Image: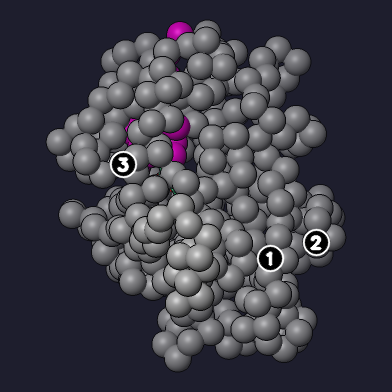
Amino acid sequence: MARWREFLPVTDATPFISLNEGSTPLIHSPKLSARVGRGCEVFIKYEGLNPTGSFKDRGMTMALSKAVEAGSQAVICASTGNTSAAAAAYAARAGVACIVLLPAGKIAFGKLAQAFMYGAKVVAIEGNFDDALRLVREIGETEPIAIVNSINPFRLEGQKTASFEIIEVLGDAPDIHVLPVGNAGNISAYWMGYREFHKLGRATKLPKMTGFQAAGSAPIFYGKVVEKPDTIATAIRIGNPASWDMANAAIRDSGGSIDIVTDAEILFAQQWLAANEGIFVEPASAASIAGLFKCLGSAPCATCPFPQIAEGSKIVCTVTGHGLKDPDIAREQCGSVIPAKADKTEILRLIAG
Ligand code: AN7
């Protein structure tokens, strides 16, 4: 991300706490392009290939750099898993302490393993992400600990660089950008990045920002706080998003939409993407692909931008985190082996069946 420094709130005095995040591949999907039809092209921004396996690294390099610049000795965040993994890694890199508040029992195992290995202090609270974020805000008021959740504005500054990379590769902004929405920081950050490059003349247009929430955790779609959010996509199990207003503005100002996808649709899309394009993402990330399928199906939302899509449009779907983050889902969904003796004849018989 160092190459975007001139667009980031850093000076020569800012230390550069980095693990070479960003510059993730924008992968063309022939199969999804064919499904959209009319000469449209679909690209997948594979954010699972960041150093800790999610897009959170883009924001965390900035948050930790600024925290260290300000003299912080410790950082804290609430998380559904990926923010804590990134915070723990960048804090380790910076040599500062890291405390993470997680909703007990609702964190995918890969993410928990990361927080442990990077040496964070892991606190599992009885409550959901929204409770954890409220506690982090309270702790930040009285303790000398820097908050590195996306209420820290440097996080979104870092995350906006994904838009820059997309414009760089496509030569312009896409027409539609589809992404999962949880705490709503990422959709706000992408919109910030697109507008910034548009203003600078590096893009001639702005994409319609099209967000998807899990049906059981969809406060923005329903327009009200969800007290008990629920979804298999634990990363986006959030009932009161921190960047709610910014996300609404991005959706409204871009002519985009916000819609929901069910857990079944998410799991189908996750398996479809892995089995058909070789891209393995975690369930929350698959919400964007599930959303694309919904847009193309018989029941898109009232403001869906796809029915009006022009011939040859470019669509980008962000997939936010790596599939290995949540190994239990893979085991539950499709984990079956074929037991066999170490015998060639038997193996050939079994694989032919
Ligand atoms: C894989 O880690 O909120 O709408 O605490 O991990 O910007 O919140 C994670 C969110 C999408 C939603 N996909 O992004 C956390 C956390 C994945 C995620 C989202 C998250 P935002």
Residue 145 lies in the magenta stretch = no
Q: Please state the horizontal and vertical placement of residue 169, each as a whole percent of the image.
A: 81, 56
**Whether residue 125 is visible:** yes
The number of discs equals 3
- Amino acid type for the residue under numbered disc 3: Ile
In percent of the image, x 18 and y 54: which residue is there? 227
Residue density around tag 2, few if under 14, some if 14–19, many if 20 or more, within 10 Å: few
Name the residue furthest left: 126
Q: Which residue is mark 1?
A: 43
Question: Which image quadrant is residue 42 in?
Answer: bottom right
Q: Report the front residue among 30 and 338.
A: 338
In percent of the image, x 63 and y 20: which residue is there? 17
Dot 3 or dot 2: first in sequence order is 3
In percent of the image, x 65 and y 24: which residue is there? 18
Q: CA distance from mark 1 to mark 2?
A: 10 Å
Secondary structure type for disc 2: helix
- Amino acid type for the residue under numbered disc 1: Phe
Q: CA distance from mark 1 to mark 3?
A: 29 Å
For the residues bearing labels 1 and 2, Cβ distance under 8 angstroms: yes
Identify the image quadrant of the N terminus: top right
Which circle marks residue 170 in the picture? 2
Query: In the figure, is residue 103 to the left or right of 16?
Result: left
Secondary structure type for disc 1: strand
Instruction: Give, as a single range, the part of the protein colored magenta.
Output: 73-85
Q: CA distance from mark 3 to mark 2?
A: 35 Å
Nearest-to-viewer mark from 1 and 2: 1
- Amino acid type for the residue under numbered disc 2: Leu
Which circle marks residue 107 in the picture? 3
Residue density around tag 3, few if under 14, some if 14–19, many if 20 or more, within 10 Å: many
Question: Which image quadrant is residue 103 in?
Answer: top left
Identify the image quadrant of the C terminus: bottom left
In percent of the image, x 70 and y 12: which residue is there? 13
